[in-house]
Amino acid sequence: MRKLLAEFFGTFWLVFGGCGSALFAANYLLPGQVETSLGIGFIGVSLAFGLTVLTMAYAVGHISGGHFNPAVSFGLWASGRFETKDLAPYIISQCVGAIAAAGCLYLILSGKEGFAIDATQAGAFASNGYGSFSPAGYSITAVFIAEFLLTMFFLIIILGATDKFANGKFAGIAIGFALTLIHLISIPISNTSVNPARSLSQALFTQGEPLSQVWLFWAAPILGALIGGLIYKNLLQDNK
């Protein structure tokens, strides 16, 4: 139960901090101003996602392993570092944590006059998408490839940083900065997922086309994570 609670709180913080920064702070304008923005932009949102993982990796990573992402759980399972019996409980905890965070974001945003989610707009409520729901209009194929590759490398970084031969004290930093880099690359492509729970939580509140597209943000990250786990286990891992 402690492990599942750690995954709940870690995933909650990832969605609340990462998606919250996109919703509250990315394009903030002072009242009455059109041009002068205090928003944090792509760089700020990318850092926010990285910082959520970095901070929770040190806060609860020693309890659950700090997955906070169904794709990461699958990748660790493929690498032989995670037991099959724990997959479903971890994924359920991660999804519940992500949905709870999205619910809190929705409640906060509802306190602003005129708030409404426009499900026809790309990136609405920090949702992910392809085609006309990609921030820059990238195709389904392009988004799938990006999500697959970025998650694959994310798993290779996670597995390498947490290897018994690596300096584990710095693993959280490497993983947090990896997620930052991933967002710097792919926010314009897909609004960045690499995390099925994060995609599901926002799509559930957005509804419409973003919800019908959420399958890709489960399939591509999980497939990428499985391949990343197998690559590290069979090609990179030192078993001496």
Image: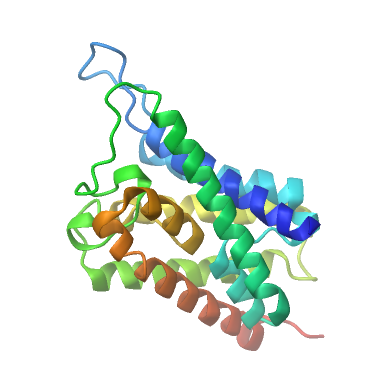
The residue sitting at 52% across, 82% down in the picture is 227
The residue sitting at 53% across, 39% down in the picture is 17
Which residue sits furthest top? Answer: 32
- Left or right of residue 217: residue 62: right
Which residue sits furthest bottom? Answer: 234
Q: Quadrant of residue 95?
A: bottom right
Q: Quadrant of residue 149?
A: bottom left
Q: Nearer the viewer, residue 55 or 235?
A: 55
Residue 72, compared with residue 176, is above or below; it is below
Q: Nearer the viewer, residue 13 or 160?
A: 13
User: Does residue 34 appear in this view?
Assistant: yes
Residue 20, compared with residue 90, is above or below; it is above
Residue 235, compared with residue 37, is above or below; it is below
Q: Nearer the viewer, residue 129 or 39?
A: 129
The residue sitting at 59% across, 75% down in the picture is 74
Q: Nearer the viewer, residue 115 or 19?
A: 115
User: Does residue 195 appear in this view?
Assistant: no
Q: Position of residue 11 (x, y in %)?
A: 59, 52
The residue sitting at 30% across, 29% down in the picture is 115
Q: Position of residue 218 (x, y in %)?
A: 43, 70
